[in-house]
Image: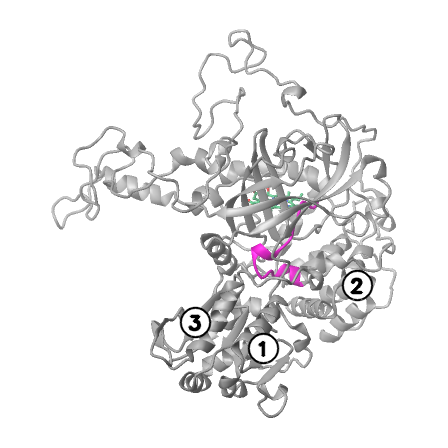
């Protein structure tokens, strides 16, 4: 290690030699460079720069004496350590972030003057943070929950944050109810149980009294709430926003993110297992994909509604519990987001990232959605407590690439050194600067929406259809997806102890779909309650007429929407899918390598799992590196499994209970399974073997289980099966004891 011999003034301000080996850079990641620290080859120093000679022993009064108060090195180190933690986010505490870039496909000038949406050549740096909502910072990634999908665009006109979720709607219609919702879903206040789970009394108590949550609950009980990967989920801006063009014309817009790998989920039983085997599953998946160069990509989609069409729909565009079905207003794909660089430091970047739905640029504006309006207050407020003061925008990950000049001053941890005497406007001593920018120079002007109304605490009647889109969602699901929802409701309500709450939920479900309500009621040994005329909605102002607040019955103009079912997602790639190969000494070289090469050629990640760590010896005596032993791997961490041939290998795997469990579980979770016909004995040891045709056929393809003696053909069939993601039809018998 090349060490400096003499202290050099300012040596700890030296810029690191390069940003991060092999990682793409962009204007934002380069702008953060002066804040990066690299210790390679450097001496250790205290915070004031003095070099440290002994970092092992505190200063004592004699070798066995008490520590001295004088020990500034001990005090500084311990004090800093004591203050290492900041409050976690009150919601969305658990998350993972990454840097990337965004490019629009072609100019959207006809819709918006936003600078970053004008030029297909322009690359806008972004930082994205994905999150769960309810759990704390250390909770499992695989909770049944909404996922946050927050994107910070560092545009030339300032930061634009699209702070969205992986579901296009929300639980409540008014921000005033947000603290209630969050209190209900968080662990219960007496014993702080359960962590990162909605399956408990307080959540369902609240939901069962709030029919406006019906649509969101359908999404939450669907497989969307247990994504396979952050890279395989959609994102939505949720609220209706506005685009404003140069002529000052406004169009309503809904934002979508469409993942290029398709939208995929895991099974609920699998999610619960992953939570134990690898609670960092999504974080690891995102990190590994970016490190390996398999950069996650999404297309930005927009649904545009001309202002004149504001009242064209049966639902209110301002109601955040409603989607605009894609059949009514198609999603135009207008640009691409690519995540290509992991953060250098989780705390500095991901934890300190401060998103705000109110960070907008000229060309993008708000609507009166009452949820959006409340959010416009909350996000700055929450950073003040979480990041400790009003200068959080100066933290490297938050500071814009656009220049900042204003008369805001001082406060905790101020970094900027404002020169000059004047910190007010108007001023003459500072030459009148900083000057207000005319709109033509990028000065933000709010859309002059006409508003004419009385000051009133009330809700528009147009917000009172709570069930038609909940029904549309349910009816748009494939049969397996509907079954999963029935199971999810039965699970969650099954964890609720208060029978009254269960009953109220059945009453709500019966407003959405009778067969759904009946199936869930059956699982709980309840019946669908007769219509007693009792109010369904309990979220009513004190002096209001309860009838005024009850849901109205409406039918959607659509019976189904294809876009709502994950069954209709793209299934044309196996890129980044993880494939386990169960092998042991004596594995057939061709059977292993040919299939492996084919899968890897298609972008999949293949890992060898053997009885022991280290390496195994193939039939020809070649050493093959082992990724995991059967002890450290689990089927729930893979998308598919392959058993290659080789007499000794097959005999060993057949005799390994963990390997047979691996296959049984992969079958139970409906994954693609391929077995070289020369290893058929392994398959015969599984639980599901009897479901294959008699006689040990050398070619079987059934519900994603492939047996073939011809490895080339096997690889082709296997790839096609993996691209399908899951074979849910296998769930029917539901007999697998894994
Ligand atoms: Fe948030 N939300 N939210 N939210 N939200 C926060 O801000 C809030 C809502 C969303 O990765 C907090 O910095 C209110 C909808 C994401 O850092 C807080 C209301 C949507 C993230 C807050 C909502 C979101 C947050 C907590 C109802 C989807 C994580 C920490 C009016 C469109 C951002 C923070 C990140 C975070 C308030 C509803 C998305 C407390 C009051 C709807 C993705 O300010």
605 or 697: nearer the eye? 697
Circle 2/circle 1 CB separation < 8 Å: no
Q: Is residue 229 magenta?
A: yes
The residue positioned 28% from the left and 32% from the top of the image is: 48
Q: Quadrant location of the N terminus?
A: top left
Mark 3 — residue? Answer: 608
Q: Classify mark 1: helix, strand or loop.
A: helix
Q: Return the residue at label 1.
A: 667
> From where the camera sits, is residue 350 visible?
yes
Residue 369 appears in the rendering: no
**Depth check: 644 or 652 in front?**
644
Going from N to C along the chain, the mark reached first, 2 or 1, is: 2
Whether residue 461 is situated above or below residue 646 in the rendered picture: above
Q: Which residues are magenta?
A: 223-238
- Dot 2: within a 10 Å radius of its alpha carbon, few (fewer than 14), some, or many (20 or more) residues? some
In space, the residues marked 2 and 1 are separated at their CA atoms by 28 Å
Instruction: Mark 3 vs mark 1: give the one in front.
Output: 3
User: Is 513 placed left or right of 299 in the picture?
Assistant: right
Label 3: state its secondary structure: strand
Identify residue for label 2: 475
């Amino acid at each position: 290690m090349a060490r400096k011999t003499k202290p050099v003034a300012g040596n700890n301000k030296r810029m690191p030699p390069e940003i991060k080996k092999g990682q793409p850079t962009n204007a934002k990641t380069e702008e953060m460079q002066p804040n990066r620290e690299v210790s390679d080859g450097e001496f250790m120093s205290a915070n004031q720069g003095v070099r440290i000679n002994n970092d092992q022993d505190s200063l004592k009064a004699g070798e066995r004496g008490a520590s001295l108060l004088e020990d500034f090195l001990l005090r500084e180190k311990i004090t800093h350590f004591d203050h290492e933690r900041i409050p976690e986010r009150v919601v969305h505490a658990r998350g993972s972030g990454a840097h990337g870039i965004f490019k629009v496909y072609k100019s959207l000038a006809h819709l918006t003057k936003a600078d970053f949406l004008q030029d297909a050549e322009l690359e806008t740096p972004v930082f994205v943070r994905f999150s769960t909502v309810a759990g704390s910072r250390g909770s499992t990634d695989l909770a049944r929950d909404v996922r946050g999908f927050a994107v910070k665009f560092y545009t030339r006109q300032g930061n634009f944050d699209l702070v969205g979720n992986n579901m296009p709607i929300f639980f409540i219609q008014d921000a005033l109810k947000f603290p209630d919702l969050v209190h209900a879903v968080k662990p219960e206040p007496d014993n702080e149980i359960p962590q990162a789970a909605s399956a408990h009394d307080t959540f369902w108590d609240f939901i069962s009294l709030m029919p406006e949550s019906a649509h969101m609950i359908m999404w939450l009980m669907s497989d969307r709430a247990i994504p396979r990967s952050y890279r395989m989920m959609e994102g939505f801006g949720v609220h209706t926003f506005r685009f404003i063009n140069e002529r000052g014309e406004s169009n309503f817009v809904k934002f979508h993110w469409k993942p290029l790998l398709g939208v995929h989920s895991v099974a609920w039983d699998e999610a619960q297992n992953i939570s134990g085997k690898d609670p960092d599953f999504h974080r690891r998946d995102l990190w590994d994909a970016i490190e390996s160069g398999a950069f996650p990509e999404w297309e930005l989609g927009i649904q545009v509604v001309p202002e004149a069409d504001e009242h064209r729909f049966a639902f209110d565009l301002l109601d955040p519990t409603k989607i605009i079905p894609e059949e009514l207003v198609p999603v135009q794909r207008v640009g691409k987001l690519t995540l290509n660089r992991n953060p250098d430091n989780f705390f500095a970047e991901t934890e300190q990232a401060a998103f705000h739905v109110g960070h907008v640029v000229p060309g993008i504006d708000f609507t009166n959605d009452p949820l959006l309006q409340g959010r416009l207050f909350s996000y700055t407020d929450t950073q003040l407590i979480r990041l400790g003061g009003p200068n959080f925008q100066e933290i490297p990950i938050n500071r814009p690439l656009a220049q900042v000049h204003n008369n805001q001053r001082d406060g905790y941890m101020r970094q900027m050194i404002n020169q000059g005497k004047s910190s007010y406007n108007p001023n003459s001593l500072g030459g009148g600067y900083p000057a207000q920018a005319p709109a033509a120079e990028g000065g933000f002007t709010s859309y002059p929406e006409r508003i004419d109304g009385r000051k009133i605490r009330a809700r528009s009647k147009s917000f009172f259809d709570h069930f038609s889109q909940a029904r549309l969602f349910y009816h748009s699901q494939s049969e397996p997806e509907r079954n999963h929802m029935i199971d999810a409701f039965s699970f969650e309500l099954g964890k609720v102890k208060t029978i009254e709450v269960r009953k109220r939920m059945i009453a709500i479900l019966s407003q959405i779909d009778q067969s759904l309500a009946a199936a869930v009621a059956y699982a709980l040994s309840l019946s669908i309650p007769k219509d007693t005329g009792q109010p369904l909605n309990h979220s009513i102002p004190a002096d209001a007429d309860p009838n005024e607040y009850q849901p109205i019955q409406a039918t959607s103009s659509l019976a189904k929407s294809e876009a709502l079912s994950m069954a209709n997602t793209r299934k044309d790639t196996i890129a980044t899918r993880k494939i386990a190969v169960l092998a042991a000494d004596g594995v057939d070289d061709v059977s292993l390598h040919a299939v492996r090469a084919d899968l890897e050629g298609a972008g999949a990640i293949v890992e060898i799992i053997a009885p022991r760590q280290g390496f195994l010896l193939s039939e020809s005596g070649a050493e093959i590196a082992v990724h995991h032993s059967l002890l450290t791997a689990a089927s729930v961490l893979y998308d598919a499994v392959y058993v290659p041939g080789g007499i000794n290998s097959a005999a060993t795997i057949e005799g390994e209970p963990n390997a047979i469990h691996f296959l049984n579980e992969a079958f139970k979770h409906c994954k693609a399974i391929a077995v070289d016909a020369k290893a058929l004995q392994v398959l015969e040891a599984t639980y599901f073997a009897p479901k294959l045709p008699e006689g040990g056929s050398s070619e079987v393809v059934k519900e994603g289980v492939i047996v073939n003696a011809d490895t080339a053909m096997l690889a082709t069939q296997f790839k096609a099966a993996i691209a399908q993601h899951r074979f849910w039809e296998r769930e029917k018998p539901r007999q697998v004891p894994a």
